[in-house]
Amino acid sequence: MPATIKGRVKSYFRRAMRRDDIDDDTDIFEAGVVDSLFAVQLVAFTEQEFGVVVEDDDLDLANFRSVNELAEFVTRKSALSQG
Amino acid sequence: MIENGEPGVARREEFRSFVEATIAPHAARFDREEKLDHDVIRKIAGAGYLTPWLPKKWGGEAMDMTVYGLLNEEVGYACAATRSLLTAHGMVAQAIHRCGSTSQRDRYLPLLSNGDRIAAFALSEPAVGSDAAHPELSAVPVTDGFRLQGTKTWITLGQIADLFLVLAQCEGEATAFIVDRRSEGLSVTPIAGMLGARGAMLATLDFDGCVVAADQVLARPGSGFSLVAATALDHGRYGVAWSCVGMIRACLDTATRYTSERSQFGAELSQHQLVRRIIADMLTGQHAADLLCRRAGTLREAGDPNAVMETIIAKYFASKAAMRAAVDAVQLLGANGCSDRYPVARILRDAKVMEIIEGSSEISQLSIAGHAYRQHPVGSGPPPAEST
């Protein structure tokens, strides 16, 4: 099981999209890999997988559009909740 | 049916008693008069059924999502128009709950929960239906907020709603606004003559320079469709799916009773094999729809990301099954089925609406097929043939 936040995000992206050609910086919405419904799914994944609460201010597609963006967002949120 | 030992059996009985006493006696009249009774809405609110899934701090009871599904099934069994209240109102409450600021939640959720305010989701426009991510209604920033200009239409409960969740185009980005009905520059025109869900009191909303305060923006500008509207629609689809289970059950109850009591060619209709085939398909459709809804409910309760797609699948299947059941029930009842002496004609008209709202069957198929392709790896050639 991937231990790092980024590893877990990557693993979910692979599972959900069954694609190996998603770079860590690929904008999955721009690339048309997923439809807009996937954003709601990603919010649920983030909360369930990492136990963070996605607040209204966090509801910005920029936080969810790539492996790197989402991993950074979760890292930020986790640090805040621990601080 | 999976009934014995299921969570929520007692609640189902509670819902059924409420519906039988409060809603069912009026369903045909709501359809005929094309409006709901304020008194019935008040009783639904008083029973805590408007947004029972909300946390207790905002007036809900944190109801389990499968139990909430049963509530939708029982109300849908009696009256699809009344049940649309749970969807339209619930979609706005869910959007505020998931996407709203703390002050927006504190301000609106208690009022929505106890029914002091009724809400409606203003998404469709005269020229915008399935492509709802690209509204034409514009929101232009002004000194005291945003000025809305444009038209929303086919808005369920628009005739009586106190506040609207409105999706607008703001500086090129879909943005969601909470708009008070009393806002200057907003006018509401009732829509009559709909095919089904006739009591749902649809309306057209005209925004003519309607100014909305900046703190009425829900979530960030640009997240209006992909996060706010998608969250609302996801919630709405779940209730619609369960409602369809109730509608199939209503068709089945009517059809089995009718075909057991009426005789033709010297035998009860129920003894004719072609009739039994139809009844068998109806019951199978009900069970399958029920199980898909329960699967979606379990995933929703767990906060599982797969819940979004499983809810689309449940709504797609259940609405198709409801339409088939209603067509078949009318067929079995013959001329009686085409009359208003039995509920199946109304259910047939209502079932067609279920195939259209909260994502049409065709849009659902696109989403489901996209999901299927994502779940199955694409190889470099055709699948290997089986050896002979």
Image (cartoon, coloured by chain):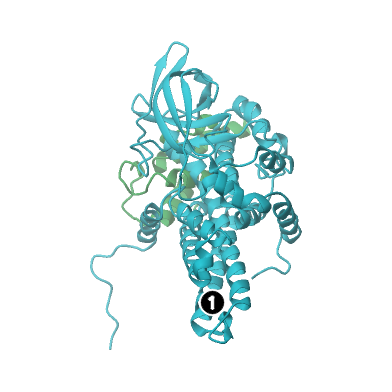
Residues B354 and A65: in front is B354
What's the residue at 41%, 55% (across, down)? B361
The answer to whether residue B302 shows anywhere in this view is: no
What residue type is disc 1 on? Ala
Q: Which chain carries label 1?
A: B
What's the residue at 50%, 42% (across, down)? B231
Residue B245 sits in quarter: bottom right
What's the residue at 72%, 42% (across, down)? B43
User: Image check: B244 left or right of B4?
Assistant: left
The hue in which chain A appears in the rendered picture of the protein: green
Residue B66 sits in quarter: bottom right
The C terminus of chain A: image quadrant: top right
Secondary structure type for disc 1: helix
Q: Where is residue A53 in the image (x, y as percent from the top left)?
A: 58, 38
Residue B163 sits in quarter: top right
Residues B92 and B342: in front is B342
Above or below: residue B279 compared with residue A67 = below
Q: Where is residue B78 in the image (x, y as percent from the top left)?
A: 63, 55
User: Image check: B387 left or right of B313?
Assistant: left
User: Image check: B53 left or right of B231?
Assistant: right
The hue in which chain B appears in the rendered picture of the protein: cyan
Above or below: residue B268 compared with residue B287 = below
Residue topped by disc 1: B280
Residues B78 and B87: in front is B78
Q: Position of residue B210 (x, y in %)?
A: 45, 19
